Image: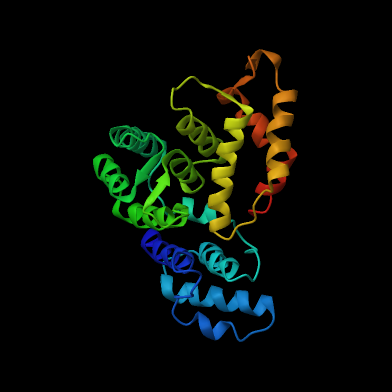
Amino acid sequence: HQRAGLRGVVLTVLRPLELGLSLSLAGLEDCQSSSQSARFGDCCTDRARKLSGPFLPAAVSRAAAGGVYCLMGQGQSGDHLAVAVLSHVVQSGRAELMAMRRHMADSSKRNHDGLLISRKHFHAAESAVTVDESDRDIYDRLFTLFDKTGGGQVLFKDFIVGLTPIMKGSFDERLLCALQLYDMEGTGMMNQTDIKMVFRSMNHTAGMMGDPTLVLDQLDELVETVFVSIDEELVVKGKIKYEQAIQEFRDHPIIESYLARDV
């Protein structure tokens, strides 16, 4: 009951973005009349609780309401990052995402591209992996948001990595999965440029959820300082053994500061 209720709120949070930020959550228009942000946030919270039913924990419904609150340009939720809320809804984990990547990569190669994946082939990958129907609803809306040209195609590596911030698991598990998804050859090693691309894809998803994001200078500083500070044995020819560097990334002041917002 909790998962079903929150899923409904989550899909409502995603829908305004998908439709050009047009608000579709029933009744929230009434909340906009409040000029004070605190009162607006309380109103969103009440609406989310009513829509999500009595089984949804109050803290989670506040966070989901905060997602709508952010998408409407009113500021950050005071309770949780929206991606953290979504991770309690999404049932897919590393195994499903890795399996989808394999199917998507095969489809991309068969279409003589190697970079792009269509919505049709993404859906085929979901079916092959038997992704839960509720997850498919969320992923489909994210596909629309990643489709920058509206042509029904996305850069499949960026997109699949962009799903990791909302997968179930800890921050360490999500980051490691994101790096492994981007590492198509499975070498266990990546250079600075590739790791920056991973963080940018994850950052992109956070931004679409209405969460605060890291600016490019912060992402550059994060990756570059980890490469400098980490044990020399973990860096080979300009590439880092990323699985052994997860803690270095997590404990970096930039990441610590970001995660501290999820209170």
Question: Residue visible at 46% across and 57% down?
Answer: 145
Q: Toward which corner of the image does residue 73 lie, by quadrant? A: bottom right
- Considering depth in this image, is 251 or 201 the residue closer to the camera? 201
Question: Residue visible at 74% across and 30% down?
Answer: 225
Q: Position of residue 199 (x, y in %)?
A: 59, 40
Q: Is residue 54 above or below residue 142?
A: below
Q: Position of residue 139 (x, y in %)?
A: 39, 52
Q: Is residue 83 above or below residue 64?
A: above
- Considering depth in this image, is 157 or 176 the residue closer to the camera? 157
Q: Toward which corner of the image does residue 32 lie, by quadrant? A: bottom right
- Image position of 108 (left or right of 223): left
- Extreme residue in the front direction: 112
Question: Residue visible at 70% across and 25% down?
Answer: 227
The quadrant in which the C terminus is found is bottom right
Colouring rule applied to residues: rainbow
Question: Residue visible at 54% across and 44% down?
Answer: 201
The quadrant in which the N terminus is found is bottom left
